[in-house]
Amino acid sequence: MKIGIDIRLIGKKRTGDEVVFFNLVKNLARIETNHGFELLTDITDEKILREIAENLEIAGKDNFKIISLPTSNKFSWNFWTLPKYLKKNPVDIYLTQYITPFFVPRSIKIATIVHDISFNFFPQLIKFSDLLFLKILIPLSLRRADKVIGVSQFTRDEIIKFYKMNPEKVDYIYNAIGDEFLKANISQVEKETVRKKYQLPEKFILYLGTLQPRKNVPKLVEAFAQVKNKLSGTKLVICGNLLAHNCDKQIEKSVATHKLENDVIFPGFIADQDKAIVFSLASVFVSPSLYEGFGIPPLEAMSQGVPVLCSDIPSLREIAGDGALFFDLNNLDDFSKKLYDISMDNSLRSRLIRLGAERISFFSWKKSASKILAIFEGM
């Protein structure tokens, strides 16, 4: 088969979405197969394209080819640029995420990855223009897709239930952690270099991810405010892009309200090559989300021997299992108590670190790439 894959996310600093496509493609390239892969992107800079090929480990692989299709914006890509290309250069299967392309021949089978459908359950947390776009185009895209792929059993079930879809049309593959998180023995010199680069404190609780409202970061600030004085100098580090269009403006307001300007650090976006080291420097990692389709950061923290505290939601229960401590989203006192316990109770910390190390072995990009290839072959 000839398989087209939308890799526009790779190189765009889109955190979770980019991680998924990068690691799927990288691990597909490690599988011995006769299938051909066309990796489609809107990036035109030759230097960046060479770097992408090198990072994906596809340089010199005859069955992998990056194709650059310049476009003015993401709308014209789906409505014009990509359909025009595929009509002249058809593939057997095209893989994208969420929004499927329009006016593509029915002979081309389309698979789309859906990371989550949180916008249906928390519409008040999304800009009206974004919500309108999702509410109109997602149902159309799911109808056009030949296969819809969730990133967890929970996400698959949500898609089937909410959109009333035939279960046979919807499957799932798990996300996992990247190769950089599986490397052992990060040196003290590397740690101190990264600590200095991002001006990280000696002891800190970490949040790393997007800063969308559904991530519930202001609640983490509130919980931290309740126990800060009992945590012997521990700071709160919130990593992510504060300038992103969908950033939760309540985060900085919450910091100001609780007078935590000297106790909450915002290092900004963390480069991919530094993420594992930043996790390894943390004393605790917290995922306070209201809704997740999967949630890669808890696994990344576990891989670095960091105890994890998560909101008690179905997807994080599915992913973290007994490798994390969970708090009640509707109970701030429970959140702050668990935050204190996981920071100060050495017996609890040791147990979570041990169970977390066992938990990450359940997920791998190699297994997920093999499964998505099997999905393609069954379409």
Image (cartoon, rainbow, N blue to C red):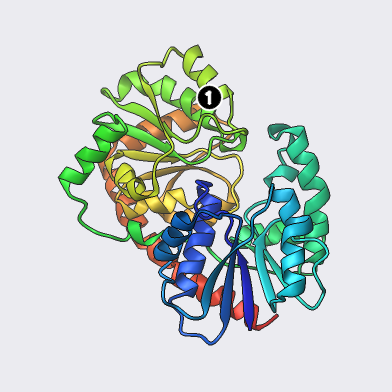
Badge count: 1
Q: Quadrant of residue 100?
A: bottom right
The location of residue 376, given as percent across then percent down, is 64, 78
Name the side, left or right, on which 194 lies relative to 378. left
Taking 53 as reference, is 182 left or right? left
Q: Amino acid at mark 1?
A: Ile
Toward which corner of the image does residue 184 lie, by quadrant? bottom left
In the image, residue 68 above or below residue 345: below
Residue holding disc 1 = 251
Instruction: Report whether residue 21 is seen.
Output: yes
Q: Residue at horizontal 48%, vertical 41%?
A: 209
How far from the left and from the top, in percent, is residue 312?
54, 44
**Image x and y of residue 284, in percent:** 35, 39
- Dot 1 falls on a residue whose secondary structure is helix
Image quadrant in which the N terminus is located? bottom right
> Image height check: is 31 above or below 254?
below
